[in-house]
C-alpha cells in the first residue's frame, strides 16, 4: 500500500491520497494536526499524550516523503515533527 498521488487543498483544508490499490482517502488538516503521531504530541506513554485544541484553521504548508513508508507534514503553526506512516494513513487511523 503506497500512495500514487498526494494532493493538498488549502482552500478546502484537506489532503487527499490516492493509493496503489485504487482506494482514495481524504483527511482534514485539523484532523491530521490534532492526531499528530509525534512523541511531543502523543508522549512516550498514554498518560503523556497531549490534547491538541484550537487547530480549526491550521493549514498544511509542506509535505515530504520519508523513505518508502511515511510522510512528514508541516503545518502553518510551525509543527513539523510528526511522521505519518502509510499504514496509519491508509487505515485512516492517524
Image (cartoon, grey):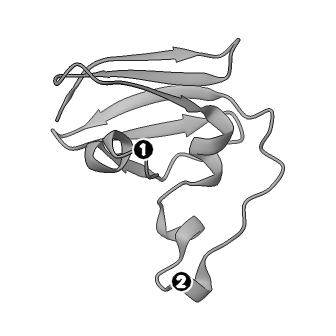
Q: Is residue 16 left or right of residue 4?
A: right
Residue displayed at 46% across by 52% down: 94
Residue displayed at 68% across by 39% down: 30
- Looking at the image, the residue that sits furthest to the right is 54
Residue displayed at 57% across by 43% down: 32
- Where is 93 relative to 30, above or below? below
- Report x, y in % for residue 59: 68, 29
- Report x, y in % for residue 26: 49, 26
- Report x, y in % for residue 40: 56, 68
Residue displayed at 54% across by 54% down: 36
Mark 2 or 1, nearer chain start: 2
Where residue 57 sits, quadrant-wise, is top right
Residue sitting nearer the eye, 83 or 4: 4
Q: Which mark is residue 46?
A: 2
- Where is 2 relative to 77, above or below? above
What is the crowding at mark 2: few (fewer than 14 residues within 10 Å), some, or many (at least 20)?
few
Q: How many marks?
A: 2
- Where is 45 relative to 72, above or below? below
Q: Is residue 35 left or right of residue 87?
A: right
Amino acid at each position: 500500500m503506497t500512495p500514487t498521488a498526494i494532493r493538498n487543498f488549502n482552500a478546502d483544508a484537506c489532503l487527499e491520497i490516492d493509493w496503489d490499490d485504487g482506494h482514495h482517502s481524504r483527511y482534514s488538516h485539523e484532523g491530521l494536526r490534532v492526531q499528530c503521531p509525534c512523541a511531543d504530541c502523543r508522549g512516550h506513554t498514554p498518560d503523556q499524550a497531549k490534547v491538541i485544541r484550537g487547530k480549526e484553521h491550521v493549514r498544511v504548508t509542506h509535505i515530504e516523503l520519508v523513505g518508502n513508508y511515511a510522510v512528514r507534514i508541516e503545518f502553518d503553526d510551525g509543527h513539523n515533527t510528526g511522521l505519518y506512516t502509510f499504514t496509519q494513513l491508509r487505515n485512516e487511523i492517524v
